[in-house]
Amino acid sequence: MLKNENSPFNIASEGEFLTEALRQFHVQYQSNEVYRQWVDLLKVKPQQVEAIQDIPFLPIEFFKSRKVVCDDLLPDAICFTSSATTSQIPARHYVNDVRVYEKSFLTAFNAAYGNPQDYCILALLPNYLQRQGSSLVYMCHHLIQQSQHPLSGFFLDNLDELKNAIDTLNTSGQKTLLLGVSYALMDLCDLGVKLNSNFTVMETGGMKGRRKEMLKQELHLFLSNGLGVTSIHSEYGMTELLSQAYSKGEGKFSCPHWMKIFIREVDDPLNLRHDDKTGGINVIDLANVNSCSFIATKDLGRLHADATFEIMGRYDHSDVRGCNLMVGGF
């Protein structure tokens, strides 16, 4: 297990972020076999890594085929898994100390939304509840516990019960976070549910084959009109990360101060872009102290001058040819 697990959450400047990122790179190069082999394959000399742009990003695909973990797994390690169809291999993120994840999501939520105790939290996550190992369910479970509101909880397919809870909360004026997957929130719209101004609606993405895929702008317009709210919030997270970015509208996400987004060239995945054009999303998540903090995702995005970012879509198989060639030789 790495030491100083709280240090990422105390970062207060760009200089401190760089210092911690470089520290984690050198530690993870030594203690994470998968990451070390990847860095060596790219012929990167650790002693020459002195800046962010020098750090190699590990393709996210390795979480499906290898144990991306520092040192040995402890007996009480947790394995978070992604959703997958029968033809897919789920990603697996082994977490030796789940307290680091709890510190990450609680600190980030407090910074973005305030104390969970101020909210009633309604989690409409049917497809996540139907499988084991969801990091999103783990997070929501703890936020619901922190909320301590009697109506806080998970809702599977019991939309009528959820509608009754919403009616009560509309009347009471209680500040409420309604968090759900896209198709389930659309189902709620079809029931004619209307929310008042004390509600915050957060979609976590995913039609999961239940409805036709929509552009994010179309989805948010449908939900805001259907539920009667002015904006739709979003959460950007994944199994392979222990941190989340949040959008409070218009699809622009902000990271907590221990997480940064970089954009790489689509056709040359080892090079970072330095403009506002679309490219592949690389993430430095310094909460990943016991796995790998430097992840090249399969998302496409655009980074703005104010450090907010947008999700533009996903790579298709033809677009990742450069990365696939490298992974294939690993």
Image (cartoon, rainbow, N blue to C red):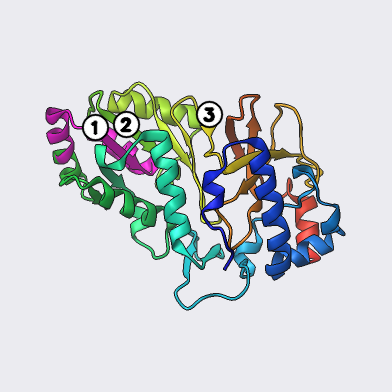
- Decide if residue 48 is on the left or right side of residue 229: right
Labels 1, 3: front one: 1
Q: Is residue 44 above or below residue 148?
A: below
Q: Secondary structure at mark 3?
A: loop
Q: Give me the disc on residue 243.
A: none
Q: Position of residue 123 (x, y in %)?
A: 30, 46
Q: Which residues are magenta?
A: 165-192
Residue under the point 72% across and 51% down? 22
Residue under the point 28% across and 23% down? 228
Q: Quadrant of the C terminus?
A: bottom right
Mark 1 or 3, nearer chain start:
1
Residue 206, can we see it? yes
**Contact flag, marks 1 and 2 (Cβ < 8 Å):** yes
Residue at the spot of label 3 = 252
Q: Is residue 166 magenta?
A: yes
Q: Is residue 282 magenta?
A: no
Q: Give me the disc on residue 200.
A: 2
Residue at the spot of label 1 = 175
Residue 209, can we see it? no
- Decide if residue 183 is on the left or right side of residue 173: right
